[in-house]
Image: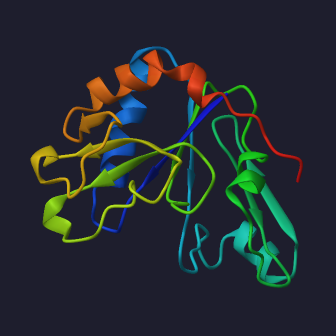
Amino acid sequence: MKVVAFAGYSGSGKTTLVEQLIGCMRMRGLRVSVVKHAHHNFDIDKPGKDSWRHREAGAFEVLVASNQRLVLQRQFEQPAQLSVHHLLAEVYDGVDWVLVEGFKKSDLLKVEVWRKASEQPVRYPEDDFVVAIATDSPQDLPEATQRPVLDLNDAYAITEWLVANQDRFEYNPPLL
């Protein structure tokens, strides 16, 4: 599978871009998964539902499946600091691409998502893993770069660039 991360500060447009890329890749017949970093406590379950009750009773894992969907919830007994590589190990190995949202400090190849309007600094001058910058204001990049500068508002063109460079994004998992 190919793996690329999209890194940028909150409000830069990462989620919107990833959402659009999923559609563009699906139109090409590609199977896409997403790994998303959450900075806070989150819950996909609803109080009172069977799976919620099982988890509340102390189950370490609750797997819920139907003929259209499978969800695995794992409740850590102690806070766990999982790397992006731990999460990628959980992804179904039959996917073509995994789009990673967040994990800006990871050692994955990444596209930096940057908007001048965000008033946030860029990461590419110090991050050797940034292989391209997706922006809506290329003329305002604070430092010149030899990296490709992609139009943040053109998911089709970004998809084309990713597919054209797909060999770079072949995932070779480290030994965990």
Q: Residue at x 33, y 36 (%)?
A: 146
Image quarter of residue 91: top right
Q: Residue at x 53, y 75 (%)?
A: 39
Q: Report the side of 14 relative to 96 (left or right).
A: left
Q: Residue at x 39, y 60 (%)?
A: 123
How far from the left and from the top, in percent, is residue 17?
32, 44
How far from the left and from the top, in percent, is residue 100?
54, 48
- Position of the C terminus, as image quadrant, is bottom right
Q: Report the side of 143 relative to 60 (left or right).
A: left
Q: Report the side of 10 relative to 35 (left or right).
A: left
Q: What is the total number of numbered labels drawn onto the structure image?
A: 0
How far from the left and from the top, in percent, is residue 78?
83, 85
- Position of the N terminus, as image quadrant, is top right
Residue 54 versus residue 94 in the image, above or below: below
Residue 66 versus residue 58 in the image, above or below: above
Residue 146 versus residue 94 in the image, above or below: below
Residue 130 versus residue 104 in the image, above or below: above
Which sits in the foreground, 163 or 121? 121
Image quarter of residue 133: top left
Q: Which colour style is shown?
A: rainbow
Q: Residue at x 74, y 36 (%)?
A: 92
Image quarter of residue 83: bottom right
